[in-house]
Amino acid sequence: MSYIALCLVLLAAVTHACWNLSAKHAAQSRHFVWLFSAGSVLVYGPIVLGVLWVEQPQFTARHWLSLAGTSVLHLLYSLSLQRGYRVSDLSVVYPIAQVTLDKPLADFDEPVGLPTTWLIDPQGKVAAHIVGPVTAASLAKAIGVE
């Protein structure tokens, strides 16, 4: 990897982390999502208009529907993430928000309910799977101590 590519990847990681910290800090306000969305339009709008001017793509109704659907889903994701940040810690909310049911993490079953907990043994293998809140009783049962 070239030095410039490495710097760009690190810059993207720092920017992403700063955005999530800012979102957590502003969790009590929906203005953050609105301002971020408006800022994105201001930054990317001229680029999109330039590409449309030069490339002159021919959009069909299906393209417009896909663009609108993606926009709505992204807005809902942002609002859901803000809601999560209002009620819980960043280290809990963000990883859950990033796992999708169609792409579960390797070595883990597809979650069937939240919260879903996997107990990992010392060798790094999944030892037990708990669906629902983890209580002392469910933990004792999962590790064989009753």
Image (cartoon, grey):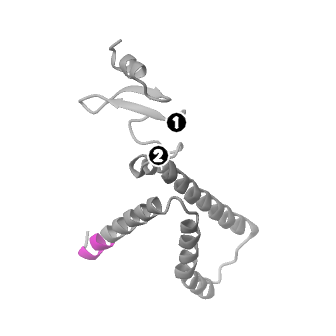
Specify the quadrant of the image occupied by residue 126.
top left
Magenta span includes 2: no
Q: Amino acid at mark 1?
A: Leu
User: How far across and how far down the image is residue 64, in percent?
Assistant: 71, 69
What residue is shown at x 48% (from left), y 30% (from top)? 133
Specify the quadrant of the image occupied by residue 59.
bottom right
On screen, residue 93 versus residue 119, left or right, reads right
What residue is shown at x 40% (from left), y 61% (from top)? 21
Q: Is residue 109 visible?
A: no
Q: CA distance from mark 1 to mark 2?
A: 9 Å
Q: Up-down: is 103 above or below 13?
A: above
Nearer to the camera, 28 or 20: 28
Residue indicated by mark 1: 114
Task: Determine crowd level at label 2: few under 14, some 14-19, many 20+ residues with C-alpha closer than 10 A.
Answer: some
User: How far across and how far down the image is residue 39, in percent?
Assistant: 54, 77
Task: Determine crowd level at label 1: few under 14, some 14-19, many 20+ residues with C-alpha closer than 10 A.
Answer: few
Nearer-N-terminus badge (1/2): 2
Nearer to the camera, 97 or 103: 97
Magenta span includes 6: yes
What residue is shown at x 38% (from left), y 36% (from top)? 107
Residue indicated by mark 2: 96
Q: Tell which residue pokes out farthest to the top in this image.
A: 146
Q: Amino acid at mark 2?
A: Ile
User: How far across and how far down the image is residue 135, in percent?
Assistant: 43, 25
Please, what secondary structure does the residue beneath circle 1 have?
loop
Q: Up-down: is 116 above or below 21?
A: above
Q: Which region of the structure is painted magenta?
A: 3-8
Question: What kind of secondary structure does the magenta stretch mostly adopt?
Answer: helix
Q: Tell which residue pokes out farthest to the front in this image.
A: 28
